[in-house]
Amino acid sequence: MEIQSMRELIDVCERKQKNIGEMMLLMETEKSGRDEETIIAMMEERLIKMKEAVDSGSKDASASPSGISGGDAVKMVDYMNQGKALSGNYISHAMSYSLATSEGNARMGVIVATPTAGAAGILPGVLFSLHKNDGTPFKELVMGLFTASMLGLIIANRSFISGAAGGCQAEVGSATAMAAGTIVELKGGTPQQAVTATAIAIKSLLGLVCDPVAGLVEVPCIKRNVIGTSIAFSAADMALAGIESRIPCDEVIEAMYRVGKEMPRTLRETSLGGLAMTETGKQVKERLFCRKS
Amino acid sequence: MEYQSCFDIIGPIMVGPSSSHTAGVVSIGKFIYELLGRCPQEANIVFYDSFAETYQGHGTDKALIGGLLGMSTDDPRIKSSLECAKEYGLRYQFGFAEGCEYYDHPNIVIVTAKSGDEVMKAGGVSLGGGLSKIFMINSEMVDIRLSAGDNFTALTRQNHPRRKRLMEAI
């Protein structure tokens, strides 16, 4: 069984009366020859690693080796504990977990790529926020990872998921889209609604360039992961409210592909444009890599 | 369809900071290690395009050397692999170029590795999300998909007959 488009995904889910996560699990069993139990255990292992990254990152205020990131997760936790967060519990928890993961990634800590390391903060951010705020059990979060991977597989095969290939829209964009669809499914939405949330999320980040300062997955990557979680929740809320995407998800993905293809090389993770080429960005690069010149 | 499995999307479990510029590159290095059957004594490494511009920030150099030393994507020693290379007796040299004539992608590395009398040249591309591909071995174009999410012990076993076949072909 091959599912190549969001349209096909919705059709097959309706035909088989399964949700997206269950379809992914079925497809993986057929393709890999592994039994369901083994596959679920492998996914659980990934969820556990994600949790460990969130937990260690939430307490660690140390700077990254470059010195340009670190310490913000702890600040966010303190701020939330004072009850000041304006964006509510779901989003503010997701923000702090996402910060914790992405800061850990910059320290060369162990993380789980979802779908990439540069976008590794978004999915754990929303999943553990759901767990914290409405007690979504870990078992369901594991199923959520199957939902996310099905959405990600379709995006990856029809477009791209890395900043070097298609800009940040492809990286943080794909992760945010996967997270949005996953929230919808975990909150009982239909496959169609999950795909709608996916489309809305991609549309919101369409055209975003990949311009990391000094080539490091830190500035602006970490904060874009954080913002990705709030877009994921907003997109999910819209889809759950019954709002539709005027442009079908497959066409949105195709648009992302075309935009990425037209994006100049300087804005695709080469650090030759955007924020990387600001005065401050260039100074950071010079300070860190003066050996190179 | 380059991406096949849910673990191509969720995973690998890896040392940061980049799945394409760190994890995928560890796999390319590790494949060469498996193909040689041991860690090479000399390695000449050419990074292209995005790899050439950003390798320092992403630890792409540490990732490749870590892989050549036989490390996996989640091995914490990757952070200090350049120092490990001395202990393992691996001499390496990095070169940089803009576009690769053999394959069109921003994340390309070509490694010429020497171990005893064996010399091999391998081209690898990191596709994103920890997935990579060996597209060239010596002058032969190949298509060997590497997923860092795979069980590397199993991958090694699969590669042994392939290694023999590949080495005979060369």
Image: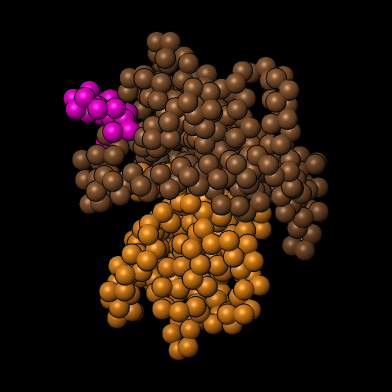
Chain colours: A brown, B orange
Q: Kindly tell me whether residue A265 is visible in this rendering.
A: no
Nearer to us in this view, A227 or A140: A140
Q: Position of residue A125 (x, y in %)?
A: 55, 33
Part of the protein shown in magenta:
A2-22
Q: Position of residue A26 (x, y in %)?
A: 24, 39
Answer left or right for B62 relative to A63: left
Q: Residue at x 39, y 32 (%)?
A: A140
Could you tell me which quadrant the N terminus of chain A lies in? top left
Answer left or right for B79 relative to B104: right
Q: Residue at x 63, y 62 (%)?
A: B79
Q: Residue furthest left?
A: A15
Q: Is residue A151 above or below residue B11?
A: above
Q: Residue at x 58, y 29 (%)?
A: A94
Instruction: Write down the quadrant of residue A150 in the picture.
Output: top left
Q: Is residue A47 above or below residue B21?
A: above
Q: Position of residue B109 (x, y in %)?
A: 51, 63
Q: Overall secondary structure of the magenta stretch? A: helix
Q: Kindly tell me whether residue A136 is visible in this rendering.
A: yes
Q: Residue at x 59, y 35 (%)?
A: A98
Would you say residue B146 sits in the magenta stretch?
A: no
